[in-house]
Image (cartoon, helix red, strand yellow):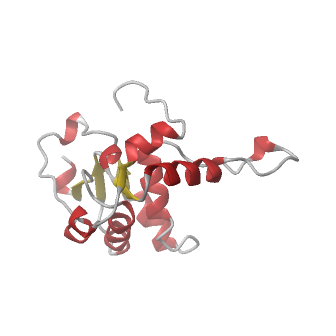
């Protein structure tokens, strides 16, 4: 069971950036972190401007050889992983090791159904006063095609 060697967070309704910051701090302390319900994470902002900004970000800007990227994730679990990775020191061993201790899932895997799901109080949606979009909905708008059950 995952809760024996780490903490399992339910991302349902948590603000993406605040959650990623709290998770990065735990990873740097050496904890193993599992995040479930990645598609239910909240991204703050107006839907139309968020979709426009993300689509702009996803465009390949190189005409020389677009096969070489850069490539950006469209899946909610990968977007969260990339957000946490951006808050870890990239070249230091503790940053690389921290990222290896992170697991992000779409939905709740069968092995974690019995686990005690925790939340992150500092990432609570009560701090959000303006409009927001669920990460799963945003991912669908920018081209994520969900296959299978997760």
- Which quadrant is home to the C terminus? top left
Identified at 32% across, 61% down, the residue is: 15
Identified at 51% across, 74% down, the residue is: 89
Residue extending furthest top?
A: 148
Whether 42 is drawn above or below 96: the answer is above
Residue extending furthest right?
A: 64
Whether 26 is drawn above or below 139: the answer is below
Whether 45 is drawn above or below 144: the answer is below
128, 34: nearer the viewer? 128
Quarter assignment of residue 53: bottom right
Identified at 24% across, 50% down, the residue is: 12
* Residue 121 coordinates in the image, percent (x, y): 19, 68
49, 18: nearer the viewer? 49
Whether 98 is drawn above or below 102: the answer is below
* Residue 99 coordinates in the image, percent (x, y): 44, 61
105 sits left or right of 50 in the view: left
* Residue 30 coordinates in the image, percent (x, y): 33, 70
Tally the marks. 0
Identified at 22% across, 50% down, the residue is: 2
81, 52: nearer the viewer? 52
* Residue 112 coordinates in the image, percent (x, y): 19, 42
């Amino acid at each position: 069971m995952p809760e024996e060697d780490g903490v399992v967070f339910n991302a349902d309704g948590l603000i993406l950036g605040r959650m990623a910051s709290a998770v990065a701090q735990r990873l740097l302390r050496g904890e193993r972190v599992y995040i479930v319900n990645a598609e239910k994470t909240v991204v703050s902002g107006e839907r139309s401007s968020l979709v426009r900004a993300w689509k702009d970000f996803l465009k390949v800007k190189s005409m020389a050889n677009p096969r070489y990227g850069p490539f950006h994730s469209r899946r909610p679990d990968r977007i969260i992983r990339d957000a946490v990775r951006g808050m870890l020191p990239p070249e230091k061993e503790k940053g690389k090791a921290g990222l290896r201790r992170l697991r992000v899932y779409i939905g709740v895997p069968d092995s974690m159904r019995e686990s005690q799901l925790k939340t992150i109080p500092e990432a609570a949606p009560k701090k959000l006063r303006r409009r927001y979009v669920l990460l799963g909905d945003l991912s669908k708008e920018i081209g994520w095609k969900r296959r299978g059950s997760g």
